[in-house]
Amino acid sequence: MALPIFTTQLSQMAMGVVDTVMSGHASTVDLAAVAVGSSLWIPLVFLIVGILMAITPTIAHYYGASDYHKMGHTIRQSLWIGLILSLLGGTVLLSAHHLFVFMDIKAPILPIATDYLYAIAWGMPAIAGYHILRYLNEGIANLIPIMLIGLLGLLVNILCNYALIFGHFGFPSLGGVGAGWATVITHYFMFLCLLIYVYKSKKFIPIQLFQADLAPHFQELKTLLKLGLPIGITFFVEGSIFSVISLFLASMGVVTVASHQIALSFSSLIFIFPLSLSISLTIQIGHQCGAKQWQMISDTIKAGYLISFGISIFSAFLITRFSTEIASLYTDNHEVIDLASHLMIFTALYQFSDGIQLCSAGALRGMKDTTIPMLLSIVSYWIIGFPLGYTLALTDIITDAMGAKGFWIGLLCGLTLSAILMTLRLYVKRKKWLKGLECPAPILK
């Protein structure tokens, strides 16, 4: 399971990197505008797809119990949730101009960032629809088609960015705004490909996905939301802190914003290594919990931490050794390269904390423990990490205002605290299970 999961995550992360790199080669202002725009729509998407992620365990349970007819009903109800969430998300993005004015976004960045989000708003239904069908396939462990469509989507994204950002193949040169429209086209392409596949594949005939019962059933909607909201809020909390930092840095000028975006973009790319491991832990521990294989849970957790540590060493070495070269891939502006390479040192340092907290969180999700981890994330990121970063970056309370570096120190502290708290929570939870005090239902049979 890990290989297609990793490849799918890689293709998704690579799309964001392609947007950033190509926008940076258009101009530093376009790069900064895409950074500011991404700081708003990406956490919003995290919230939406996190809520929709309730589909995966629900479908997996029905699949294990051979209740195929219930699977189609769940997906049709999920379409109502996806539709409502995408409309609300699109409305937020269309109103982004007022937030940018309030945040005192500089004039060169403001119109490009606004038009970029205007484009993204039209793609929200496709983003929701694609993830609904993706989670359906994940629920039945049908991962290869998702991986292949993700790779095709990455190719489409590269071609559309090339055409729309720089004005090739007869298209107008739209700069950073073109990256937004490329994202929209890519997600509609992936959604339609996955929809056609689900419609044509014999695997989905038993679930009767396309039968006419489309009316909302509020009990089913309530069940899905109760399961999905903690996941969505956790994703939003973790993703939004990076985005809010980008918004606060926007008033510091183009160089600071662009440097922060480069460091953040590459950090997101490296992030898929521990994230894939975390997802694998969720699946494997879920199986072992269902089978009450308590000792194997301990062995799996230990193995996860060991692999995570190895990944962190590799990632930290890669970043510290090649930080300047990495920044040069995004832009040829020497000021931006210099600041971005310094910020990447903090990225290297928090690889260890991030890996540990992802492993712990993945294991806890495998034990179907999501509410407490959500609260721990809120405390770590928003009660400790962000206030500390804001104090260091923009005030003289502790030391002279450090700018972007202060926020990255706050991120490092927040991630470290999250790693400690998540690990303690996992330790307590594992001890209870080893004593047989908790015996939850299996995720997959």
Image (spheres, rainbow, N blue to C red):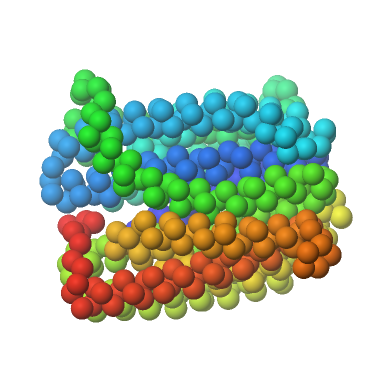
Is residue 260 depicted above or below 133 in this figure?
A: below
Report x, y in % for residue 124: 50, 30
Relative depth, front residue between 377 and 323: 377
Q: In this rendering, would 91 be left or right of 33? A: left
Left or right: residue 95 versus residue 286 is right
Q: Nearer the viewer, residue 365 or 407?
A: 407
Q: Residue furthest front?
A: 397
Image coordinates of residue 355 in percent, x first then y, are 51, 68
> Residue at 51% across / 32% down in the picture?
89
Quarter of the view holding residue 280 = bottom left
Give the quarter of the image for residue 195. top left
Q: Is residue 75 visible to the viewer in this orientation of the structure?
A: no
Q: How many numbered badges does the structure rendering display?
A: 0
420 or 142: which is nearer to us?
A: 420
For the point 60% across and 45% down, the residue is: 16
Q: Is residue 33 above or below residue 301?
A: above
| Relative horizontal placement of residue 353, taking residue 201 as reference (left or right) | right
Q: Is residue 401 visible?
A: yes
Measured from the top left, where is residue 181 in percent x and y?
61, 29
Residue 319, x across and y down, in percent = 67, 67
Q: Is residue 378 left or right of residue 194?
A: right
